[in-house]
């Protein structure tokens, strides 16, 4: 059974932290206060039972903890006195505050152009979604220490250079958008592929990203890429229930039970894609959304419009030349032209960052297996297993490797 | 009110080569000074003589009392040099960046915005 406190922190922690940051005006101070409140909750909830609104309980207790700390420091530090004044003035305000504005405000702060793009994403995932540095490191294929450094540097800059907590004015919005979209998409990815541990789907994180994407569309209806992002998240998330079987094992797209897909979400996504592509400004999210919708409307894996998907990936690669896009393009091309063509597209990636990504190796392994090169395929699966991946990925790869090494008679 | 230093970097040119451009830039700075002054944002600032007039002083030994060595110019000859600065009193970085973008040096070169340490807060 999940611990109710862990559950509250996982689901509502980001919201609580965003509100605390608004109230205290400082990320570190907010994190300290939340930590204090969690320690208090561990005792109080066991003793008195779980409060009716656990998130609001944490916010109130954390706010009081922050007040205590700052009251102690206020007499010697003018900065603390100022923060204390702010916090006291805002007392009671959070009761009817839904916190949505806080998260959006924090999102724009995390995605401020004065921070490096890498720091923006890391900070948002840490503060808004409550991911650990290990989880973020896994998502971006970089060492944990690097992520830790990016986050602490960004927090220091926000505090020292006074990067404000506010939603940008209308005329600034488009410029600030790109980083925000990247961040929301990273949140979705984090939800869709749980970084570490036994259980996959961080369901609420994916829902959270979709909710954030809806807010972005509402805020910036003229921005085609906001709609692209929403459609992409919806269409991808629609396949969620079919992605794993009853034992939590990964089910490949080819083997998924398509009746488990959320066809209502797919049709919402397809409608969004159709309307937004007509605006004639196809960006990376719109292209990916179009791909996801082509998968979503296909009656079976074999009857998927692979040649259009391959073309869309080629278009995407022009805008966004990453190993991930290349690997996906190779998969689509292999469906149209065979595994040799797919393998050829992976050649450029050898020796690069892709080699730390298990899907690069397992895709390669699959092409080699289909070409009958069992020894090379097995070696590629072993390389995949040497990369960071979650338990169900690991079991899937091990199963594939075992099948290769002991072929059925 | 937090204070920021807006450090103006650009290619050094006294304007001898193009007096017309020089007077245009001067007019632009005049305009910025009026706008920033009226808004109460400019807390100070100076324009610097070119690095060819600079003298670098170093005291050897890593402690007070060492030999004083004065050399001509800055340490390294870079293409762009610090040509002047403003002190901007702004409520946050967004406001400071907004004003920094109106300094003519931002389009003739570039402007580095750095928060000033407030020792009364330490």
Image (cartoon, coloured by chain):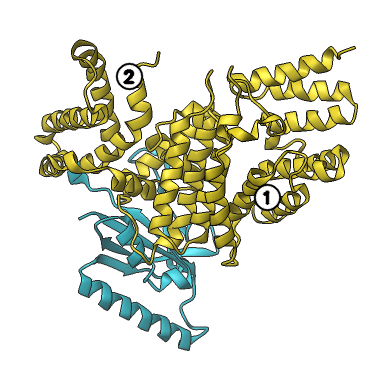
Q: Viewer-proximal residue, A162 or A287?
A: A287
Q: Earlier in the sequence, mark 1 or mark 2?
A: 2
| Mark in the foreground, 1 or 2 | 2
Q: Mark 1, residues whose alpha carbon is within 10 Å: few (<14), some, or many (≥20)?
A: few
**Horizontal and vertical percent for residue B99?**
33, 67
Q: Chain of mark 1?
A: A
Label 1 to label 2: alpha-carbon separation: 43 Å
Q: According to the rendering, which colour does chain B have?
A: cyan
Q: Secondary structure at mark 2?
A: helix
Q: Marks 1 and 2: CB-CB under 8 Å?
A: no
Residue indicated by mark 1? A321
Q: Is residue B57 visible?
A: no
**Horizontal and vertical percent for residue A163?**
33, 50
* Chain shown in yellow: A
Q: Is residue B41 above or below residue A84?
A: below
**On the picture, is A8 further left or further right than A262?**
left
Residue found at x 40% / y 13%: A1
Q: Viewer-proximal residue, A172 or A198?
A: A198
Residue found at x 51% / y 64%: B80
Q: Mark 2, residues whose alpha carbon is within 10 Å: few (<14), some, or many (≥20)?
A: few
Disc on res. A123: none
Residue indicated by mark 2? A4
């Amino acid at each position: 059974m999940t611990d109710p406190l862990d559950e509250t922190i996982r689901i509502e922690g980001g919201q609580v932290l965003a509100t605390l940051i608004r109230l205290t005006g400082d990320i570190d101070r907010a994190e300290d206060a939340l930590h204090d409140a969690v320690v208090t909750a561990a005792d109080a909830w066991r003793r008195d039972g779980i409060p009716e609104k656990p998130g609001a309980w944490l916010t109130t207790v954390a706010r009081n903890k922050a007040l205590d700390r700052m009251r102690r420091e206020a007499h010697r530090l003018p900065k603390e006195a100022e923060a204390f004044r702010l916090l006291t003035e805002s007392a009671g305000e959070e009761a009817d505050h839904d916190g949505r504005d806080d998260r959006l405000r924090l999102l724009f702060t995390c995605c401020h152009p004065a921070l490096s793009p890498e720091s923006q994403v890391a900070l948002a995932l840490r503060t808004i979604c409550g991911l650990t540095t290990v989880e973020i490191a896994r998502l971006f294929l970089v060492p944990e220490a690097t992520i830790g450094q990016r986050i602490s540097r960004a927090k220091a800059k926000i505090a020292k250079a006074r990067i404000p907590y506010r939603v940008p004015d209308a005329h600034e919005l488009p410029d600030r958008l790109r980083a925000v979209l990247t961040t929301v998409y990273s949140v979705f990815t984090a939800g869709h592929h749980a970084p570490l541990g036994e259980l996959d789907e961080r369901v609420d994180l994916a829902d959270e990203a979709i909710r954030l994407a809806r807010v972005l569309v509402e805020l910036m209806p003229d921005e085609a890429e906001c709609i692209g992002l929403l459609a992409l998240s919806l269409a991808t998330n629609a396949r969620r229930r079919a992605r794993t079987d009853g034992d939590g094992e990964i089910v490949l797209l080819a083997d998924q039970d398509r009746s488990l897909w959320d066809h209502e979400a797919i049709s919402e996504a397809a409608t969004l894609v159709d309307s937004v592509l007509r605006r004639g400004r196809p960006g990376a999210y719109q292209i990916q959304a179009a791909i996801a919708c082509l998968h979503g409307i296909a009656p079976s894996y074999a009857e998927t419009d692979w040649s259009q998907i391959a073309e869309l990936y080629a278009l995407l690669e022009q805008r966004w030349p990453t190993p991930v896009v290349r690997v996906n393009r190779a998969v689509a091309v292999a469906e149209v032209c065979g595994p040799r063509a797919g393998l050829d597209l992976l050649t450029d990636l050898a020796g690069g960052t892709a080699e730390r990504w298990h899907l690069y190796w397992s895709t390669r392994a699959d092409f080699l297996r289909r070409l009958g090169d069992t020894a090379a395929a097995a070696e590629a699966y072993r390389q995949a297993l040497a990369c960071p991946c979650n338990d169900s990925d690991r079991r899937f790869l091990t199963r594939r490797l075992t099948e290769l090494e002991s072929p059925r008679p | 009110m937090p204070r920021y230093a807006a450090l103006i970097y650009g290619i050094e040119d006294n304007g001898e080569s193009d007096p017309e451009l020089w007077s245009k830039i001067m007019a632009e700075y005049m305009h910025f000074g009026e706008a920033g002054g009226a808004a109460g944002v400019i807390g100070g600032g100076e324009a610097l003589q070119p690095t060819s007039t600079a003298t670098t002083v170093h005291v050897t030994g890593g402690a007070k009392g060492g030999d004083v060595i004065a050399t001509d110019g800055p340490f390294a000859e870079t293409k762009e040099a610090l040509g002047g600065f403003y002190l901007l009193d702004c409520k946050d970085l967004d406001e400071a960046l907004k004003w920094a973008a109106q300094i003519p040096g931002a389009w003739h070169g570039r402007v580095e915005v750095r928060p000033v340490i407030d020792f009364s807060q330490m």
